[in-house]
Image (cartoon, grey):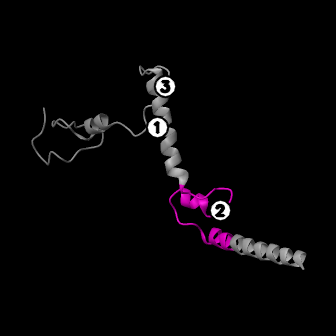
């Protein structure tokens, strides 16, 4: 027999209370699903080979679009941070400016050497 005393919303340890309303948080989570929960290359999938190939090509094109304007990870020290959507660290910015200064120095040196070869 249940007591009618106290607030119904207060629960003691070990009590389980289920929502009587449909569409509670558990049901909504079940309906929404999770991002990337389906593997696109699942061999038990009922999609045809042409549909799988088309999906893979679209994924490759999306990746190319996403990385097209980004600097090369091996050439620019600020690229990894930019690639992940963050601001480059102070050290990466300093490394980038040093590399730019070195490129300018090498190009000036090459111009000077070419000038000396002509004289």
Q: Earlier in the sequence, mark 3 or mark 1?
A: 3
112 and 76: which is toward the camera: 112
- Kindly give the residue lying farthest to the front in the view shown: 118
Is residue 39 in view?
A: no
Residue 42 numbered tag:
3
Give the residue at x 48% y 39%.
59
Q: Residue furthest left?
A: 4
Q: How far apart are marks 2 and 3 (CA)?
A: 37 Å
The residue where tag 1 is placed is 58
* Label 1 secondary element: helix
Local secondary structure at mark 3: loop
The residue positioned 61% from the left and 64% from the top of the image is: 78
Q: For the N terminus, which image quadrant?
A: top left
Quadrant showing the C terminus: bottom right
Sequence-earlier tag: 1 or 2 = 1
Residues at marks 3 and 1 touching, judged by CB atoms closer than 8 Å: no
SS under mark 2: loop
Expressed as whole percent of the image width and height from the top left, the position of residue 12 reads 25, 44
Q: Where does label 2 land, which residue?
A: 76
Q: Give the extent of the magenta segment.
A: 69-97
From the viewer's perspective, is 14 left or right of 92?
left
Q: Which residue is drawn at 18% across and 47% down?
A: 9
Q: Distance between the residues labelled 3 and 1?
A: 16 Å
- In front: label 2 or label 3: 2
């Amino acid at each position: 027999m249940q007591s009618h005393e106290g607030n119904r919303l207060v629960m003691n340890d070990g009590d389980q209370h289920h929502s009587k309303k449909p569409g509670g948080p558990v049901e909504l989570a079940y309906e929404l699903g999770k991002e990337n929960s389906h593997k696109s290359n699942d061999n038990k999938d009922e999609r045809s080979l042409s549909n799988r190939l088309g999906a893979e090509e679209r994924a490759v094109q999306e990746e190319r679009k996403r990385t097209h304007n980004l600097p090369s990870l091996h050439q620019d020290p600020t690229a990894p941070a930019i690639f992940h959507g963050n601001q480059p660290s102070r050290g990466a910015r300093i490394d980038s400016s040093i590399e730019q200064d070195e490129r300018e120095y090498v190009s000036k040196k090459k111009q000077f050497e070419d000038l000396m070869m002509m004289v």
